[in-house]
Image: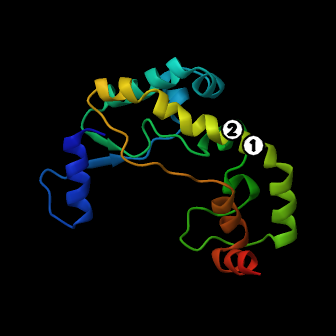
Amino acid sequence: MTDEQWQILLAIIKGENLKPLPVGFIIDSPWLPNWAGISIFDYFSNPELWFLANIKAIKTFPEVLFSLVFGQSMECVQSLLPLAPDVFGAKTNSPLPKKFYKVSVIYIIFLSLMYIKILLPFIIKRPIQFRKHIEEEGRRIRFAVSRGPLNIASFLMGSTDFLIALKT
């Protein structure tokens, strides 16, 4: 995000009326590599291709405020493995997703997927390693987003039941 785009985002958060209206877009790893013409595997395994895919999006849509460009999260896990909540049948297009799994089922699902946590240090390090190149493009990393196991579990169980299970 450029400094100018950051100021626009701060103005939006403050509730200011901006003209023209800014355009924002959530961009993440399930979409970006395919759009850029590379495989999801190459996007995560090849740092140069990761960087070029992000730059391609920025240069193709220079007026857009992207939320996840140069940021990675558990999206890589969800891209490489079928871990998005909707894969398990959760209705994610509603503010109140339908709950249908019990704690024991969630526990088994996430125990079987614990090996993915080894990817997190690599995910976090990539933007740091490319910070100089990102700044050479006139951008800065402003924030990070993580949608991981807790997010998925809340969709599968329903937020209330998930929080109660977490507490107990």
Question: How many tags in the picture?
Answer: 2
Q: Is residue 93 left or right of residue 138?
A: right
- Res 101 visible: yes
Q: Is residue 105 left or right of residue 31?
A: right
Estimate the x, y position of residue 68 in percent, counting from the top left. 44, 43
Q: Is residue 89 left or right of residue 144?
A: right
Estimate the x, y position of residue 49 in percent, counting from the top left. 52, 19
The foreground one among 147 and 19 is: 147
At a point 80% along the width and 69% down the height, the residue shown is 101
Identify the residue position indicated by label 1 in the image. Answer: 116
Q: Give the amino acid type for the residue marked by disc 1 in the picture.
A: Ile
Q: Secondary structure at mark 1?
A: helix
Q: Which mark is residue 119?
A: 2
Quarter where residue 130 is shown:
top left
Estimate the x, y position of residue 147 in percent, counting from the top left. 59, 53
Q: Determine the CA span between mark 1 and mark 2.
A: 6 Å
Q: Is residue 154 left or right of residue 18?
A: right
Q: Residues within 10 Å of mark 1 (few under 14, many from 20)?
A: some
Quadrant where the image shows the C terminus: bottom right
At a point 72% along the width and 75% down the height, the residue shown is 166
At a point 32% along the width and 48% down the height, the residue shown is 24
Q: Give the amino acid type for the residue marked by disc 2 in the picture.
A: Leu
Q: Are marks 1 and 2 in contact (CB under 8 Å)?
A: yes
- Res 30 visible: no
